[in-house]
Amino acid sequence: IVNISSIGAHVTFPNYAVYGATKAALTHLSASLRSELGPRDVRVTNIEPGLTATELGDHIDNPALAHAGQLGEFFDALGGLSAGDVADVVAYVASRPRHVNLRQIVVLPTRQAWAVPAGRPHTGPVGNCA
């Protein structure tokens, strides 16, 4: 089982509380499933991408946060991963030997590598971005 969560599960982003909460729930679900299914040789991996080009911006109803606003600024400052980049990570996870379980993988655009855990100050060029 490969779940796609987000670094938003661990890093807070102003105005994205609900998004972060849902990603944290998926991360926790992955951990729970791993402990339940591991004894039956079922691997469960949680992939947590950083800023990734998806349709998310098309579903944000606040223009200040969408592609024309904050999200667009994040992409301008940091670049972003493509769906193909994340798919490569999924393929890597699935290609590991059956006895190898990659618990969690965080994948970020290179310029987003400064993202820090919730509650810690950040020093990045733009506010914390997911």
Image (cartoon, rainbow, N blue to C red):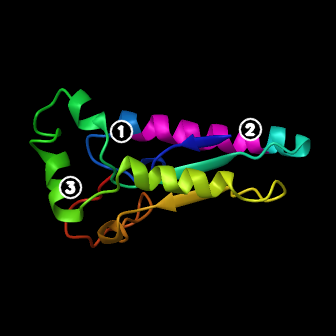
Picture disc at residue 49: none
Q: Residues within 10 Å of mark 3 (few under 14, many from 20)?
A: some
- Residue 68 location, quadrant: top left
Give the total number of marks visible in the rendering. Answer: 3
Which of these two is toward me, 79 or 119? 79
Left or right: 63 with respect to 29? left
Q: Residue at x 69, y 58 (%)?
A: 102
Q: Are marks 3 and 2 in contact (CB under 8 Å)?
A: no
Residue, disc 1:
17
Residue 33 is inside the magenta segment: yes
Question: Which mark sits nearer the N-terminus, 1 or 2?
Answer: 1
Question: Which mark sits nearer the N-terminus, 3 or 1?
Answer: 1
Residue, disc 2:
33
Marks 3 and 1 sit apart, C-alpha to C-alpha, by: 20 Å
Q: What residue type is labelled 1?
A: Ala
Residue 3 location (% of width, % of height) = 58, 41
Marks 1 and 2 sit apart, C-alpha to C-alpha, by: 24 Å
Q: Which amino acid does label 2 sit on?
A: Leu
The reply to whether residue 7 is in sight is no
Marks 3 and 2 sit apart, C-alpha to C-alpha, by: 33 Å
Q: Give the range drawn in magenta.
A: 20-34
Left or right: 60 with respect to 34? left
Which of these two is toward me, 22 or 37? 37
